[in-house]
Amino acid sequence: MTDKFHRETLVAGAGVSTDRAHNSVSPPLHLSANFYWNDPCEKPEYDYSRSGNPNRTQLAEALASLEGGARGVVTSSGMAAVDLVLNLVDPGDVVLAPHDCYGGTHRLLTARAKRGHFKIVYVDQTDLAALAAGFAKKPKLVLIETPSNPLLRVTDVEKVVGYARQVGAIVVADNTFLSPALQRPLELGCDIVVHSTTKFINGHSDVVGGAVIAKDAELGEELAWWANCTGVTGAPFDSFLTLRGLRTLFTRLERQQATAHDVVNRLNDDRRVAKVFYPGLESHPGHDIAARQQSGFGSMFSVEFTEGIDVLELLRRLEIFTIAESLGGFESLVCVPAAMTHAAMTPEARETAGISDRLVRFSIGLEHSEDLVRDVFAALDGAVADGNVTYLNEQAVGACA
Ligand SMILES: *Cc1c(COP(=O)(O)O)cnc(C)c1O
C-alpha cells in the first residue's frame, strides 16, 4: 500500500493478507511475549513484545500513514502517549501548554513540573497576545489541543507553528478530538501528533490506548527508543482491536458528524439554550480557523442551558444518551463537565475557564439522528427547574462533585 491510495483504502487494507504462516486474510493476533530465534546469531524481526509486536506494528503503520508521519509508536494509553513525548525535554526547558488542555494532561504536566522535570507555562492559545507572551519564554516543546474540551475552542495551528519555528520549539498536537479523518496537524507544520486512541480511533469504547506519530523518522526513532526503554508500549490485543475499530473511522465520523449537525441546529434555535459551542456554527469564534484547518467540524459539542433548566435532571431523563465521561465511541454520551470531567477544578477556575455549571457536553454516536433529537427534547421538557428562581442546580453540582 502506498501514497497512491486514498486513506480510506489504506485503513481497509492495513495488515490484510500479510500472514505468511497460514494465509489468513485478517491479521492474526500475536499474544506471545517472546519470539524464537532460529540461530543465536540471527536476531529475528521480533524478539520480545515490549520492544516489538506484529499487531502493534500494523496499527502504528496505519496511524502513521493516516496522519502523514514517518513513524508511529503505539502506547498503552493516551496519557502514556503524552508522557512519552515529555522525554524530549530536559530539566530547565519550558513546555508551553494550553490552559484548557485535557485534565489528565494538565495533572501530568503540573506534577512533572513540580518534580523539576521541566518548567510548565499554561496559556490561552486562542489569545494571540497571551500566546506571544508564552513564546517569549522560549519553550522547547509546545503542546496544542484543538478543538479544546469542553468548550471546543479552536487554536490556529499554523500561527502556533510560526511562533515555534522562531524559537526552535517542537510542536506536538493532541489530535484526539477530531482524529486524522478530520484534521492532519503534521500537514499544518506540527512535528508530532499524539492520540488517545481510546476515543475516535478505536471508536468502540472497549480499549484504552494511545499513539504518538512523528513527521520525521529520526524523531520517531527516538520516541520508539523511549517507549521500549520505559515500557509504555501498548498490548497486542489492544492493538488488534484498535486496528479493527480504525477500519471504520471515516464511515463512523461522517455519520456521527452529520448527526451532530442535526442535533446542534435543532438545539441552537431553542429558547432554553443559552449558547451552543460547536465550531460548525458561524457564530462560533473559531469557525473560520476550523473551516480552514479541519476537514469537518466533528461530532462533539457542548450546550449551556438557561437558568430555567436543571441540567442534572436533564441527564437523568435522557433515554438514549449514556451518562459517562470519555467520547468518540459508537454510543452517544453526555456529561456535565462541572460535576464530572472538570469536577477537580475549583468553581473559580471553572468560571475563569468559561465552564458554567449549566454546561452539558455531548458526544454523538451512531444512533439515528431523529431519535437523538427526540430524546434531548423530551428530556428538556421534563427538566424545567420548576419556575424556581433560586435554582438548585449549583448546589446539586457541588453535592455530587
Ligand atoms: C482522553 C484524552 C486523553 C487521555 O487519554 P487516555 O487514553 O484516557 O489515557 C488525552 N487527551 C485528550 C484530548 C483526551 O480526550
Image (tube, rainbow, N blue to C red):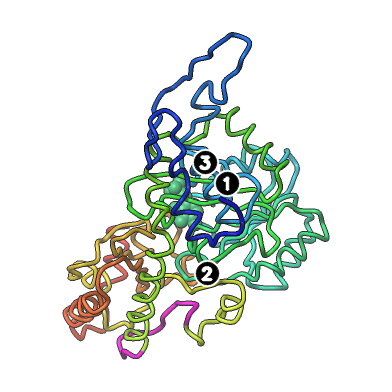
Looking at the image, residue 282 lies above or below residue 179 = below
Spot the residue most to the top: 40
Q: Which of marks 2 and 3 is nearer the N terminus?
A: 3
Residue 166 in the image: x percent, y percent?
A: 83, 61
Q: Is residue 73 left or right of residue 164?
A: left
Distance, label 3 to label 1, CA atoms, is 7 Å
Q: Is residue 271 visible?
A: yes
Magenta-drawn segment: 269-280
Q: Quadrant of the C terminus?
A: bottom left
> Which numbered disc, 2 or 1, marks the residue that appears first in the sequence?
1
Q: Earlier in the sequence, mark 3 or mark 1?
A: 3
- Find the residue positioned furthest to the right: 166
Q: Is residue 304 above or below residue 253?
A: below
Please tell me whether mark 2 or mark 3 is closer to you in this view: 3
The residue carrying mark 1 is: 212
Residue 103 visible? The answer is no
Q: Which mark is residue 74?
A: 3
Amino acid under label 3? Val
Q: Residue 88: percent from the left, percent from the top?
A: 69, 41
Residue type at the position of mark 1 = Val
Please state the horizontal and vertical placement of residue 265, each as a whole percent of the image: 36, 85
For disc 3, the neighbor class at 10 Å (few under 14, some 14 to 19, many from 20) is many
Say which of 286 and 23 sits in front.
Answer: 23
Name the residue located 45 percent from the left edge and 31 percent from the top edge.
Answer: 20
Q: Residue at x 41, y 66 (%)?
A: 253
Q: Read off the residue under disc 2.
A: 352
